[in-house]
Amino acid sequence: MIRLFPLIFVLLWSSAFITTKPIVDYSDPFAALAFRFSIVAFGFFLFSFFKQQKILVPKKNAFESIFSGVLFHGFYLGGVFFSISKGLPTGIAALVVTLNPVLTNALAGPLLNEKVTWKQWVGVILGFLGATIVLGLDVGTGLPTIGIIAVCVSLVAVTSATLWQKKLSNNLSLPVSNMYQAIGGFIFHLIIVLFFAKPYIDFSSTFIIAMSHQILLVSFGAFTILMYLIKHNSASKTVSVFFLIPATSAVIAWIFLNETLNIYDIFGFAIASIGVFIATRENK
């Protein structure tokens, strides 16, 4: 089952791009994320409580996890949601964030003392090439500048969060760590809502379905798997699977939203898959 974690993660994380647009269509992005992570934090609290896990942890460990949540759930997701709410196509947002493995590979050596092999670099290059083919080289004109800036902040945040999470020395259980990270995300978005945004949420059926998907399958499912993979694998290998996300999102949109899937999408998916295989396979 553990061997399937990368595949399950890619499927669940990719599906989040499909449900982000409906959420920002019916709410302020920061209000929606504050609402989401209040529920996620409470959910992990209940799980940890009934599993009799130690919830009150040393301040150092709590701060480390909260800060990780600010990076992952705050700056990363906040940037993605905000950029899409400002009109940036989800495909472009996915492509920019796909640069995460490139930055992580470049920084994992000097910051984490990880050995990034030439095979991993070949895999990274192929992965990014495949993702670019899927999303298209012509990104068009008239893209919102504020959206581009926001998604670039997301890119830096998710890379920093991955390296920070790998560097953490605490031994908190995943549910407890995830609870504190969700608290960090909630605090971040609550501050934005209180001082910078005009919060509103239209609890339409579309919003409820999309938000339920992101809470249950993405926050409880995909994010927990990501934390497990970062903990048990090198940072550079873990994030290589991100290259499959744009292509998988395209396939999901084709299946459930009747969006077009052409020969370039399939070709790009194949190249990205080869790249991820090269970058993540064990050296013999």
Image (cartoon, helix red, strand yellow):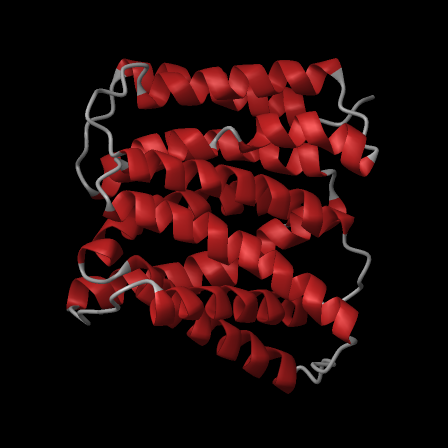
Classify residue 183 as left or right of residue 162.
left
The location of residue 158, given as percent across then percent down, is 55, 44
For the question of whether residue 269 can be seen, the reply is no
From this view, report whether residue 117 is shown above or below residue 194: above
For the question of whether residue 229 can be seen, the reply is yes
From this view, report whether residue 136 is shown above or below residue 28: above
Quarter of the figure with residue 33: bottom left
Quarter of the figure with residue 88: top left
Quarter of the figure with residue 83: top left
What residue appears at the point 52 percent right and 74 percent down from the top-left corner?
A: 41
The quadrant of the picture occupied by the C terminus is top right
What residue appears at the point 40 percent right and 47 percent down from the top-left corner?
A: 79
The location of residue 102, given as percent across then percent down, is 59, 25
Classify residue 242 as left or right of residue 149.
right
The location of residue 187, given as percent across then percent down, is 49, 70
Classify residue 85 as left or right of residue 161.
left
What residue appears at the point 68 percent right and 25 percent down from the top-left corner?
A: 106
Classify residue 139 as left or right of residue 153.
left
Q: Nearer the viewer, residue 52 or 108?
A: 108
The location of residue 38, given as percent across then percent down, is 44, 74
What residue appears at the point 47 percent right and 42 percent down from the top-left corner?
A: 154
Task: Count numbered badges in the picture.
Answer: 0
Residue farthest along the front direction in this orientation: 195
